Amino acid sequence: MLVEKNVPLQPYNTFSIVARAHTLVRVLQEADVRAVLADPELGPAPKFVLGGGSNIVLTGDVRPVVLKVEIPGRRLVGETPKAWIVEAGAGENWHDFVSWTLDQGWPGLENMALIPGTMGAAPVQNIGAYGVELQDRFESLDAIDLETGRAFTLDAAQCGFAYRDSVFKHVADGRAPGFGLAGRALITRVRLALPKAWRPVLGYLDLERRMAETGIVKPTPRQIYDWVCEIRRAKLPDPAVIGNAGSFFKNPTVTAEQCADIIAREPRIVHYQLADGTVKLAAGWLIDACGWKGKSIGQAGVYEKQALVLVNRGGGEQGATGGEVMTLAKAIQTSVYERFGIRLEPEPVVV
Ligand code: EPU
């Protein structure tokens, strides 16, 4: 086990925020976690699990011991009559894994191409894009309990997946014992079930537009992958060029009555009817309507092409601080609340 001190975290968070880890340990295998837990100094200390750093806002130096998950490996571990079961180490890059599964002839992840981050982080916020969420392809995961050192496996139901949410984002409280695993579990391996009878998922407006433009009515998985990459590159900033953490807010849901009320005032509001009768509103549209696109507070800004994405306009040491990002986020929340009566909820984890 190699323990590093005073480690710059700027290369390890896609927002490119300057901060340091007092102590950082790279986790390459399960035994590294057990070594940390058995260590007289590190064992009892608070811990912070870091994956690809694509969904966090660092608001200062990180005092808990940073466990940077770099567990490698991807392989076919089984098959059922309906699916290929494919496993990846939590440190594998999500997009590389998507490309690899397509190369192997196991489609099913193409709608989620180019989402930044690691395999281990994917279940935490139940990543999703263009009509497919991780939970639609999830089989099970292995994790280690950072309090007891015990390894355990969870299936989809036990992960408590919901829109950009899971058991890993909730802290245990007396109300639902055993539910909250935030800060407690380190995900080591993730298994996905990729359907043998592949069917394209094309219901998303941006993909329908591509079909109309190209005249392709029966796209292959590779074609959908290419379209998704094109669409994302056109409207989302590349974190390697402009620091960001993807969508900064979740799309809020409201009741049908609340929605009718808002539509009466704002007829152009972008909304989607959900199966349970509630309505999802496009947070990007709400923020855009409040005039935030392209605006900045300090070095933190609202991306010009997609108001749901906050960006770091500076580079190196001169970049945005986590404080500036959160000040901008709060100002946006206030103006959306004042105009629409809707509270936006941040998507990334604020550290
Ligand atoms: N819109 C505006 N102005 C804006 C941004 C969006 O009017 O500045 C409108 C768009 O015109 C569109 C609607 O809002 O009608 C929705 O926008 P978009 O299709 O870009 O999707 P989104 O709701 O903003 C969500 C996910 C993305 C995911 C896309 C595609 C959330 C929080 N975000 O974005 O996920 O890639 O759908 O499925 O659910 C992420 O989580 O980091 C992420 C990028």
Image (spheres, helix red, strand yellow):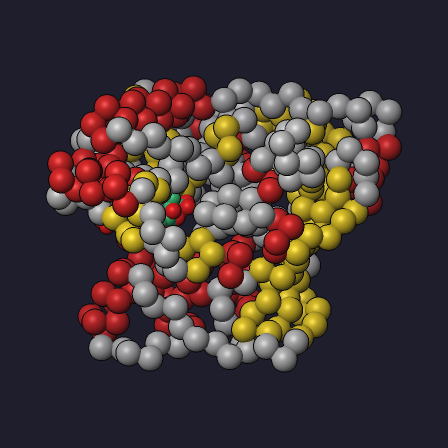
Above-or-below relation of 303 to 92: above
Image quadrant in which you'd find residue 215: bottom left
Q: Is residue 145 left or right of residue 61?
A: right
What percent of the width, then of the height, locates residue 313?
33, 30
Q: Is residue 172 left or right of residue 36?
A: left
Q: Quadrant of the N terminus?
A: top right
Q: Is residue 23 left or right of residue 323?
A: right
Image quadrant in which you'd find residue 208: bottom left
What percent of the width, then of the height, locates residue 147?
77, 33
Q: Residue at x 30, y 31 (%)?
A: 342
Q: Residue at x 67, y 75 (%)?
A: 79
Above-or-below relation of 183 to 212: above
Q: Residue at x 62, y 73 (%)?
A: 84
Depth check: give the residue in front, 148 or 103: 148
- Count of marks, rendered view: 0
Q: Using the rendered image of the protein, determine whether residue 280 is visible from the camera's viewpoint.
A: no
Q: Is residue 85 left or right of residue 311?
A: right
Q: Residue furthest front?
A: 257
What percent of the width, then of the height, locates residue 346?
42, 33
Q: Quadrant of the C terminus?
A: top right
Depth check: give the residue in front, 141 or 109: 141
Image quadrant in which you'd find residue 214: bottom left
Q: Using the rendered image of the protein, determine whether residue 148 is visible from the camera's viewpoint.
A: yes
What percent of the width, then of the height, locates residue 47?
69, 29
Above-or-below relation of 192 to 260: below
Above-or-below relation of 23 to 254: above
Q: Residue at x 31, y 42 (%)?
A: 255
